[in-house]
Image (cartoon, coloured by chain):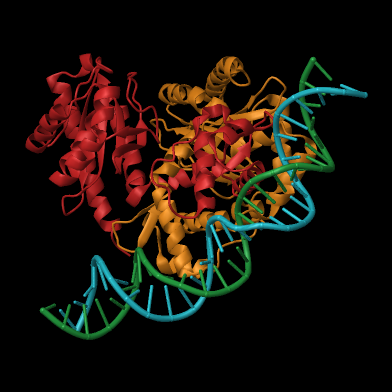
Chain colours: A orange, B red, C cyan, D green
DNA sequence: GGCTATGTCTCATTTAGTGAGATGAACTCG
DNA sequence: CGAGTTCATCTCACTAAATGAGACATAGCC
């Protein structure tokens, strides 16, 4: 089945071909992709495929698997990805704070940013109490609308931008996550009223619960969101208040630090 | 100053141009790169630059900064990077184990893999005790020879491969890290004799110490290394023995799990 | 409302990537 | 150990497709 060439890929075809190769490789997970995977999914000739594979390998974007004839994503992507995840320096600021929170409360804490119609997880710190979550690790991506961090991010966008995102995601939200737009709107209202989000409860992960707060710049635009996730049974009123306060303090400190760095020099 | 076009970049030029753009962007850190940065560093015309920027943006490999005229690395890199870091499924296996170790002992634990002449950090879990390290996070890269994990990785390569790597890195090792090849050889001998590595002491980070053990596949080739790092004052004989045993148990369990997954289906 | 720098467009030029098929190399299985 | 299969590279002619020069448009800034 050919690769999803949806997003009206314009621009240099060589570039698109190369990126398609990376996507196909990624789709293979930790087993990578074989020559046939590429030839089936893509629409160019074998010599061209090999030329691109070679180029990508030289650049460190691919490496060949120990299994002959298979290719894996290269570590250059990891390195660039780590950079990419440090959007506006936010991750570096957040990492020690997430760690402190996780150690103090035992729950799992996350940093999210918006990526188009999705939310991406920039950083996780798991605590002592095991927890289930939609994202397992850095690099996890969710359609905006899923999870408490999504709500915190959505709430501070302009109404029309928000609507555009939600109508774009509506189908996936209901099909894959059993989440209705109306419920998201309600939670956004809660976020705006109380300053934190609880996430919309779909049919998935019913035994977990969480909290999220936005990270806003001076003009009120969302830079990201900090969230946490825990077993529902741990979410007593007291614990909720404590964790929320902890998160708010850390975020306030972050934003303070950030103002010295973000838009200057 | 023009971008380092060292590594005899062959392959489609468009691809190389694109990757150069990404590298220049990465070099800008969390502030990204401006048009002039690109035009200065690269050797193609402005329309071409914009065409490539556009293409890379559409693919999610770049995004434009809130500051007009600047570009940042895109989150697609983060997502692919997360995949790339899961070489052979190792990271997924290691993550919970690193977390358990960090929580149990309070030190910081790392998963490394070899990447050509470098070691890359695939995963970190920091413990309760603060620690300094050569790598701060996932995606950090060190020349093989630096750090205890390097030793564990090097020790199980063939002698000539090892020599090739070390002679390649020799200059950087002595210049940037004040580490001599002879000392590395000595530590490799220690690794082979005792089954763990202590790292070579350069002039950097003198107050920290660490341990590392290799992760070997059935045929004795190194898949990666697990390491830890702690304040020297914490490294008593007892603590060392305990932590080492903890790491060895976790790695053994990992390799067990891995054999079910790595080379099959 | 001018000024500067970012981003886009057009179009002719020719580079430079492409496809077809043959050839070489590496691993596999009988 | 040799036949068979699959991966990887090479050659060469072709032309599609990326490129460069410079003009034009747009956005932010004082």
Residue occupying the point 32% across, 23% down: B133
Choose top left, top right, bottom left or bottom right for residue B70.
top right
**How far from the left and from the top, in percent, is residue B174?**
24, 24
**Res. A28 visible in picture:** no
State the count of labels.
0
Measured as percent of width and height from the top left, residue B253 is found at 23, 45
Q: Nearer the viewer, residue B130 or B11?
A: B11
Instruction: Residue B94: give x, y in percent of width and height.
Output: 32, 41
- In the image, what residue occupies the spot 22% across and 42% down? B251
Snapshot quadrant of residue B141: top left
Q: Is residue A35 above or below residue C10?
A: below
User: Along the horizontal axis of the image, is B211 left or right of B107?
Assistant: left
Left or right relative to B224: residue B188: left
Residue A73 lies, with reference to residue B137, above or below; the image says below
Residue A21 visible in the snapshot: yes
Q: Is residue A53 above or below residue B233?
A: below
Task: Tell me the residue at 27%/25% (across/down).
Answer: B229
Q: Quadrant of residue A190?
A: top right
Towards the viewer: A211 or C30? C30
Name the residue at 30% across, 31% down. Answer: B109
| Residue B68 image position (x, y, % from top left) | 69, 30
Front in this rendered view, residue A247 or D27:
D27
- Asked whether, in this view, residue C8 is left or right of residue A24, the answer is right
Q: Nearer the viewer, residue C11 or B152?
A: C11
Q: Quadrant of the C terminus of chain B?
A: bottom left
């Amino acid at each position: 089945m050919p690769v999803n060439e949806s997003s009206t890929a314009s621009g240099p075809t060589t570039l698109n071909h190369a990126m398609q190769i990376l996507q196909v490789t990624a789709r293979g997970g930790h087993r990578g992709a074989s020559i046939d995977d590429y030839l089936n999914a893509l629409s160019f000739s074998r010599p061209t495929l090999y030329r691109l594979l070679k180029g990508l390998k030289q650049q460190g974007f691919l490496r060949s698997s120990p299994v002959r004839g298979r290719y894996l994503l290269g570590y250059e992507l990891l390195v660039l990805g780590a950079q990419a995840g440090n959007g506006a320096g936010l991750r570096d600021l957040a990492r020690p704070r997430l760690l402190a929170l996780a150690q103090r409360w035992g729950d799992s804490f996350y940093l999210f940013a918006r990526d188009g119609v999705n939310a991406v997880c920039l950083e996780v710190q798991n605590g002592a109490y095991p927890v289930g979550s939609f994202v397992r690790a850095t690099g996890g991506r969710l359609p905006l609308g899923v999870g408490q961090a999504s709500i915190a991010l959505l709430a501070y966008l302009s109404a029309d931008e928000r609507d555009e995102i939600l109508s774009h995601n509506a189908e996936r939200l209901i099909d894959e996550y059993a989440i209705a737009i109306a419920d998201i709107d309600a939670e956004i209202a809660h976020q705006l009223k109380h300053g934190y989000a609880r996430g919309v409860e779909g049919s998935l992960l019913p035994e977990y619960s969480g909290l999220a707060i936005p990270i806003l710049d001076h003009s009120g635009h969302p830079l990201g969101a900090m969230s946490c996730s825990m077993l529902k049974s741990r979410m007593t009123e007291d614990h909720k208040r404590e964790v929320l306060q902890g998160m708010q303090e850390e975020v306030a400190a972050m934003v303070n630090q950030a103002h010295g760095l973000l838009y200057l020099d």
